[in-house]
Every structure is written in C-alpha cells, then in structure tokens.
Image (tube, helix red, strand yellow):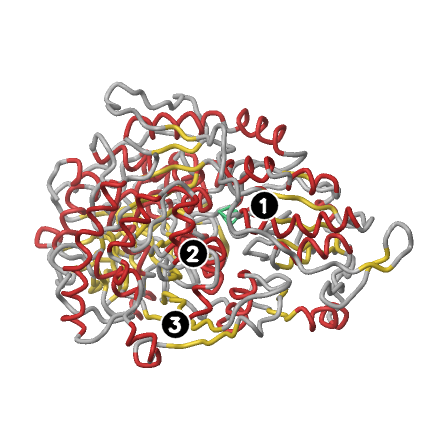
C-alpha cells in the first residue's frame, strides 16, 4: 500500500466541521470546490469569508507530487529546511527525462545511463527524507498519482502544470513551482488567490466515436487558452456521472490548456469503482462515509447561475468528436468540419505520425478503445499508413494492457510501444528528419500542441484529438479522413468502414503489475547519504544564503536597467539551460541574459562599473561578487511574469544582487524573491525609473526600521556627483521581513523560528 490512509482519515474527520463553518461564513449553500478549499484552509482562516478573485488565502495541502525535472531544485531547497522528513506525504516521479527514439526498452536503458546522477540523487534524497520514489519507467506522474494517491476531497500541489489530472477523482490538484512544493514539504502554508468558479453542466451521455477528450476539446474552444485564468472549473450534472473516473481525469488534465487553476468532478459511483479497481477499497469506504461533502450542495446544481461566476452547458449526447489545432489547443474543430478546414488552410493533409498516450489519455479505457480500432484494421486488412506510437501512462497500465493482448494488437498494426514516460509530449522525441524543418502534420492524444513542442520542428502542424480519432486517422494516413462517414480501401482493394470503437473502463481481470517501479523510503533516513558528486555539472548542494548584515545597503552597483517585458524566461532562460536546473552555480550563467538593457537596447551587454568595459550580465555580476560588491537590478512593469520557476529568484540572490527595484512585479515572482531573502521594491512614482543612470551607485536607506507598509528610500549617486532620492515601496509583511533578516525563508524554518 503506497497511499497514506491515516492522512485521508484525518482530512475526512475535519470535513463536517470545516464545511459547517464555511456555510456560516458564506451564508449560503456551497459548491464542491468551495467545500474542499475551505476544508484545507490554514488554521485561523476557516471561519472567514474569502472573496473570489480577490483574497489571498493560506492553505494546507495534503500531498505534494514532483516530476524529475522540477523536483531537483525543490528537493535541494528542501534539504536546507533542516527537517528529518517531509511534512506531508510526497512523491517523486521519473518521467520527463526519457527520450523516445527506438522503443520502450532501449530508450529506457539509454535514459537510465544518461541521467544516472539525477536519478541517483532523487532516489537517495527521497529515501532519506521520506518521499515515495517512482523510478524511471514506472510511469507518468499524473497517471501514477491517479492510480495510487488521488482521493476525493483532497488537496494536492504538484510541480507540473498537468497536476489537475487528479481532479478526475475529486481532488483539488494544482500545478505550482518548486519553491511552493518546498514550502509545503517544509511544513509552511501555501498561498493562493481564492479562485473564481466556472461551472460546466454536462447533460446526456457519450456514445459512438465521442469520448471524454472531446468534452475538454470543446471547452477549450469555448473558453480559449486564457478563459480559465484564475478560475477552478467544476463539472456537474447527470452527464458527469456517466463518465469514467479516468475520462474525468482527461478533462481535468487538459483544463491546464484553458489556463484554469484546476478542474474538478464530484465523487460518484464511477469514482468509487475506480478506487476499488485500483485496490483502494479502504479509501472508497471512507469516501462513502462522508459522501454528501464530496459533491456540491443540491441547491447549487439546481440553480448554478446563482453560485458560479460563469456557466457552460454541454449535451454529451449531441457532442461531436473534435480535433484541435494546429499550434494551439483552443482552435477547436468538430470532426465534420475538420476536413474542410485542412483544405482551406492548406495544412499538410498527409498524416505522418499518430501518437496516443501521455498523462492525458493513457488509461485502460483509452487503450482498449484505441485497440478495438487497431484490431479492426487488422481484421479488415488495413495497414496503418502513418507511423503510430503508444505511450502507456504507467507500468500498471502497460502490464495490464499487455496481459490483455492490446499491445500485441497495436504491434500487428505496425505500432511502436514507447516507454511509460512523457517522451514526445515534452519534446523528448528523437524524431528522425525533424531537423530538416519540413512542413508536416502529426496528431496526438496529448494536451499541448504549441509549435516545436513535440519534435522541435516549427513547421510540424500538431493536432490534438482523442486516442480513438488519432488511431483512425493513423490508419487512414490522412487528416481529412472522417471515420464516422468515410470508407478506406484495404489491401484487397475493397472499401471498408471502421465501426465505432468499443472498450472497457476497467479491466475485467483487474489491474496487474509485476514491478510497479516504486521505492518505499527508509523508515529512518538519518543514515542515508544523499548522492551528489562534487564534480557534477547538473547537481550542486545548496549553501544557505547569508543573513542580513543589519545595516542599510550602500554602494550597490546598477547591474542592469531592464527595458520593457522581463519575464522569468528573460531572467532565467529555459531550453538548454534546463540541464542545469539542479546546479545553481551553472544555471546562474543565464542570469538576465534575455533582458534588454535600457542604455543600449541590447540583450546581455551591460557596463561593468569596475573598469568601464561592457560584458555579459552574469560575467559582470560575477565580477561584483568577486569584489564583494552588492548590486541592484532595475525593471519595468510586471517584472517576473511567466512561469513560477524559482531559479529566476535564486540566481540573482546567489550571485550577489541585493535588490530588485521595478515599476511593478508579477506577484509570484515577487513572493519568490522574498522567500530567497531578496529586497523586492517598487517605485512609488513609476516615472522615477527614468532617474536611474547607467553608472549609478545606489544606497537603500531605512532598513534598520524596515516595517510593513513603511516605504524605504533609494539614494542614487550619479557619476557626475549629483544625487537623486527616490521613495520606494514594498509589500513585505512582518513574517516576510523576518525572511529577509534571516537571509531566506528556509533559513528561518531551519532555525525553527516560524
Ligand atoms: S505526458 Fe506530457 S503533459 Fe503529461 S506530464 Fe508528461 S510532458 Fe507533461
């Protein structure tokens, strides 16, 4: 048993009281989302009303899940917290670093060799600090979580954007950055702006070629890639209860593509069947005992307009299969209109590759339905005209579908089974010929289809559909093929038609697996050694940052005055740099290399005030560090928008930047800076940005009385001897000021001072 039954019991024990308090605070019936959110508020916030889209609220999530790429820095930071074990049940999943090239076994062997030091580190650090470790080949994080850890009414954060997959089993599951995961593992609360709520009412029942994937493809078309921002999407209605738990997972998973914080379904008979089918009857029994709390109140669903910020209604009986794309997941085409769209837009009609699987669509149901089409292809003497790959989501699913003969059917059709990992979905695809950048089409059952995502070729037109539609199109080798209406010519020259796909939600003989690939942590990890080679390029143990010296900061050099947009990608670029995401010193060589220097309109070229020369930003900053001179970065509006990557805050701190002064911050980045012990300041008068000159030496005054709501002063000493005094603001509360003084939030945790 890998799930933590005692934790689930204690969460459920608190439910009735928490929900009663929430009803009182809100003064009305509650949606499911509100029940779960209120049940997970940090102590002290439970009896207050929290305003949607406005209040920032502290939560206590039940679990943390991390994939191998993002877990590295999260765990390196966690090691700084001085705890012997993680504060909440947590897991690590090795799925993102496995490249698809030939097929499952050789690809997995190659990845183990290439990423050995990363896997050894993650395995040993998990073993020491009490985290469950899922080895390479065990499966994709979200599928493994759904099969083992997700539970109705729970709250989880995960360091991956498709964490919401667990919403299919009634969990509020939210994708976050590594710093947030580190905080929760260290026992700190986790802050979220109380979300707005979108209700999706599902009526009718799916049939024929339509599947759960088509629900989210349709919703993406309605809401677009931004329509769910700041919202949780709650699905309800009789149609919701007709969907399998894994089908619901597919819908919640791809909710990330509309920008939603997460998506969720209520607990029902399908959830119960899935829990029992995945050997968690104990969880199902517990969930049944508080069933009424694991769905929205009846008044809410009877009159949803009064309780949700927005309502969408979809009749599953009328829903058509959809194909979305290319290049964006919200360009939604009903299948009957897609062929015309392909021709009108001159998209390559020939389909090169069909890919099924990924965390979005790799359940037993998905694979059995796709296999029913593959079997028809064999029976009707059709050979797949496109290349065709299958990525099982977990070893448990892979083992079971192999036992039940489905993998053999795919292979008979010419399909290639890839490792249980992300592979082509995250660009880990050694696709032969992609470097020629030819215009071509592929179709996948994944979730994202932005340019270059799968194979690095900007001219690959990538479309997203259900595994069934992907399989039918791969058989036809033609994007204009509509399996609902069209026939195909078989090897004997006869016209044949594919019948509707058929499959099973759960295996009749139950799931089976020989080695799921799970490593249980040591009961006492005190003697376990964390493996990091001292000469590693990819991993480096962190040293705590120095505490504040207790004085005003004087004589800081201006490192760069960034002009215009400066996202976390400009501050800490991705691409090849991701290789170093576990090595702070090495990745710091990308510090601000994408930011435009106000004084020369160029990236990565700033003045070194020590000798007047111009150099690359990280190199100049390393010179200041060498001479023990602090520096300051100045920026424009919304500095640090984009991904929540913590490296964008850790790198400047590591290299000796003391403060970031901007017109305004993106909130998550501002908080990340505070956590690392940096000063995050804003101009009281944004026009003062113009006062900052290239040769400035800067003092930050007022730190001896640093207090919430009290502005500080920045003194600019210009090269000509003149001075400007600038009023600057900050949003530090008392606790965050203590982070600054301690040198970082984790230093404080370590001192047991929080
Ligand atoms: S399969 Fe794709 S979407 Fe899912 S976790 Fe992996 S990379 Fe992300």
- In x, y percent, where is residue 720? 30, 57
Q: Nearer the viewer, mark 1 or mark 2?
A: 2
Which picture quadrant has residue 459? bottom right
Q: Nearer the viewer, mark 3 or mark 1?
A: 3
Q: Check disc 3 and report its element: helix, strand or loop.
A: strand
Which one is in front, 623 or 684? 684
- Look at mark 2 in the image and give the residue it sits on: 270
Q: Residues within 10 Å of mark 2 (few under 14, many from 20)?
A: some
Q: Vertically, is 155 above or below 97?
A: below
The label number, if any, that marks residue 199 in the structure image: 3
Which one is in front, 516 or 512? 512
Q: Check disc 1 and report its element: helix, strand or loop.
A: loop
At 35% from the left edge and 47% from the top edge, which residue is drawn? 646
- In x, y percent, where is residue 311? 41, 77
Image check: 96 left or right of 179? Answer: right
Kindly indicate whether the residue at mark 2 contacts the one at mark 3 (C-beta within 8 angstroms): no
Query: Considering the image in quadrants, where does the C terminus appear?
Result: top left
Comes first in the chain, label 3 or label 2: 3
CA gap between label 3 and label 2 equals 20 Å
- Look at mark 1 in the image and give the residue it sits on: 427
Which picture quadrant has residue 28? bottom left
Q: Residues within 10 Å of mark 3 (few under 14, many from 20)?
A: many
Q: Check disc 2 and report its element: helix, strand or loop.
A: helix
Query: Considering the image in quadrants, where does the N terminus appear?
Result: top left
Q: Residues within 10 Å of mark 1 (few under 14, many from 20)?
A: some
């Amino acid at each position: 048993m890998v799930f933590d039954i005692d934790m689930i019991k204690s969460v459920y024990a608190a439910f009735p009281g928490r929900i009663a308090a929430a009803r009182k605070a809100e003064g009305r019936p509650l949606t499911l989302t509100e029940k779960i959110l209120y049940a997970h508020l940090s102590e002290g916030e439970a009896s207050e009303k929290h305003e949607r889209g406005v209040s920032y609220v502290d939560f206590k999530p039940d679990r943390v899940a991390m994939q191998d790429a993002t877990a590295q820095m999260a765990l390196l930071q966690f090691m700084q917290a001085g705890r012997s074990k993680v504060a909440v049940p947590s897991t690590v999943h090795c799925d993102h670093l496995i490249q698809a090239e030939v097929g499952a076994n050789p690809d997995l062997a190659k990845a183990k060799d290439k990423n050995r030091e990363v896997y050894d580190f993650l395995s040993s650090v998990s073993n020491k600090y009490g985290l469950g470790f899922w080895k390479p080949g065990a499966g994709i994080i979200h599928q493994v979580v759904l099969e083992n850890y997700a539970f109705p009414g729970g709250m989880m954060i995960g360091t991956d954007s498709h964490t919401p997959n667990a919403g299919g089993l009634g969990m509020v599951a939210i994708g976050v950055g590594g710093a947030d995961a580190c905080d929760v593992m260290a026992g700190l609360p986790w802050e979220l702006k109380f979300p707005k709520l979108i209700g999706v009412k599902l009526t009718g029942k799916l049939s024929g070629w339509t599947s759960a994937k088509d629900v989210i493809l349709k919703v993406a078309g309605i809401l677009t890639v931004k329509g769910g921002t700041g919202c949780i999407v709650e699905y309800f209605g009789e149609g919701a209860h007709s969907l399998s738990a894994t089908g619901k997972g597919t819908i919640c998973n791809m909710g990330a593509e509309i920008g939603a914080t997460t998506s969720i379904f209520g607990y029902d008979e399908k959830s119960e069947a899935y829990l029992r089918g995945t050997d968690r009857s104990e969880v199902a029994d517990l969930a049944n005992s508080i069933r009424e709390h694991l769905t929205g109140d009846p008044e809410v669903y009877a009159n949803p307009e009064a309780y949700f910020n927005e309502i969408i209604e979809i009749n599953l009986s009328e829903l058509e299969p959809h194909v979305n794309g290319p290049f964006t997941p919200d360009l939604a085409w009903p299948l009957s209109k897609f062929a015309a769209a392909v021709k009108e837009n001159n998209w390559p009609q020939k389909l090169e590759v069909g890919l099924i699987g990924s965390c979005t669509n790799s359940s037993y149901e998905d694979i059995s339905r796709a296999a029913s089409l593959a079997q028809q292809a064999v029976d009707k003497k059709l050979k797949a005209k496109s290349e065709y790959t299958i990525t099982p989501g977990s070893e448990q699913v892979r083992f079971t579908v192999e036992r039940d003969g489905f993998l053999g059917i795919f292979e008979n059709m010419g399909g290639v089974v890839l490792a249980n990992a992300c592979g082509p979905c995250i660009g880990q695809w050694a696709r032969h010929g992609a470097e020629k950048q030819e215009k071509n089409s592929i179709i996948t059952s994944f979730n994202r289809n932005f340019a270059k995502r799968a194979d690095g070729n900007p001219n690959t037109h990538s479309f997203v559909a259900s595994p069934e539609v992907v399989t039918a199109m791969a058989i036809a080798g033609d994007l204009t093929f509509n399996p609902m209406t069209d026939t195909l010519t078989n090897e004997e020259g006869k016209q044949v038609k594919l019948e509707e796909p058929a499959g099973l939600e759960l295996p009749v003989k139950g799931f089976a697996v020989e080695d799921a690939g799970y490593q249980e942590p040591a009961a006492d990890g005190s003697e376990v050694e964390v493996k990091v080679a001292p000469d590693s390029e990819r991993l480096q143990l962190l040293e705590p940052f120095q505490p504040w010296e207790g004085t005003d900061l004087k004589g800081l050099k201006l490192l760069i005055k960034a002009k215009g947009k400066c996202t976390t990608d400009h501050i800490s670029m991705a691409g090849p740099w991701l290789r170093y995401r576990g090595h702070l010193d090495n990745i710091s060589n990308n510090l601000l290399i994408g930011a435009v220097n106000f004084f020369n309109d160029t990236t990565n070229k700033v003045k070194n005030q020590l000798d007047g020369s111009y150099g690359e930003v990280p190199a100049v900053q390393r010179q200041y560090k060498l001479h023990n001179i602090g520096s300051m970065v100045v920026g424009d509006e919304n500095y640090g928008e984009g991904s929540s990557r913590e490296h964008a805050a850790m790198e400047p701190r590591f290299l000796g930047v003391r403060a970031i002064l901007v017109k305004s911050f993106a909130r998550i980045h501002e908080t990340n800076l505070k956590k690392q012990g940096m000063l995050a300041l804003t101009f009281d008068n944004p026009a003062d940005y113009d006062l900052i000159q290239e040769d400035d030496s800067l003092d930050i005054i007022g730190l001896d009385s640093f207090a919430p709501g009290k502005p500080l002063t920045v003194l600019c000493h210009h090269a000509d001897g003149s001075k400007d005094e600038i009023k600057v603001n900050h949003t530090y509360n008392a606790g965050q000021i203590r982070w600054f003084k301690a040198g970082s939030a984790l230093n404080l945790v370590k001192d047991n001072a929080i």
